[in-house]
Amino acid sequence: MVNLELYRVFYTVAKCGSLTRAAQELYISQPAVSQSIKQLEGQLGVTLFNRTHRGMELSAAGGKLIFKQVEDALNLLDSAESKLSELKTTASGTIRIGATDSIFFHILADKIAEYNERYPQVKFELISSTSPYTLSQLKEGKCDIAFVNLPMQDDDVKFCGTVAHLTDIFVAGSKYDYLKGQTLSIEKLQELPVLMIEENTVARHAIASFLGTLGVRLNPDIEVANWDLMIKLAIKGMGVGCIPREYCTTELASGELFEVQTRPSLPARGVGIALLKNVPLSFAMKEFIAMFNAYSF
């Protein structure tokens, strides 16, 4: 088996031409340097140095024959170590992010743009899907980090804190102005046309679970695949939509939508970071996660 340290000692002695100077450069004792040279000579079966009054000279039939190859090999190893070290202190490469369209738009877009200004050499690959499918893509190695609607559980994944809070509310357009100023019981909502996100989503499951604790089951008149469509339909008077307040702030501020007050209110949810367990993070990834103040290393 090749002992790289022996070759490093050989190379240092050859450069310095002296056991003493080599020991100083390597921060080891002179006897240790001498012993390493003897050990390497024993392994190779040749004399590597001629001991002269001027110091250590490479032997023509040994040291001179291998010096260039040893130098090249050590330089390659040093270069490889430098590249690995650079990964720990320099942001580079590609970060593959999985998230829903809404999380990308409302939570991640500004952060990605800010990160790009700081580290323009880092590229992003954005993979949009539902939170359950995004989690499966993370486990299959198709993305490096996932931002998912909580709560979620998976034994192969570690969830690293909440990066945003979502407050589900009921909203309506001008057709339902008569509801302004009222506080409706959740049960009363069953008498109104309701718009809800489609059933195979974390958001829908969380809402249904909470309503189930109240003995209420809302059967939506319309199920939609994304929040933007729900906003549009609610503004047009198609029904009362159930949507995170954070996703319709513009429409609430403009008056196109208003919040339908309910008793009780729906509980807050969160958006969290998901990472694969036991997978080391690059410097670029650590810097990106640090922007959310959700994870400490």
Image: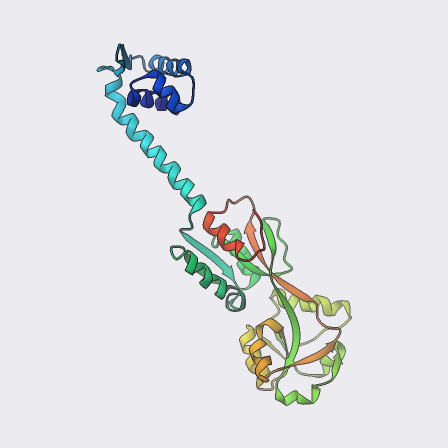
250 to the left or right of 123: right
Residue ID at (57%, 56%)? 293
User: In terms of depth relative to the viewer, which is nearer, 214 or 86?
Assistant: 86
User: In terms of depth relative to the viewer, which is nearer, 273 or 238?
Assistant: 273
Q: Is residue 173 above or below residue 267?
A: below
Q: Is residue 57 above or below residue 104?
A: above
> Image quadrant of residue 46?
top left
> Image quadrant of residue 252?
bottom right
Residue ID at (33%, 30%)? 74
Q: Which quarter of the image is occupied by the N terminus?
A: top left
Give percent across and percent down for residue 87: 42, 45
Give percent across and percent down for residue 28: 43, 20
75 to the left or right of 227: left
Looking at this view, name the residue that lies furthest to the left: 60
Q: Is residue 255 above or below residue 78?
A: below
- Residue 150 visible: yes
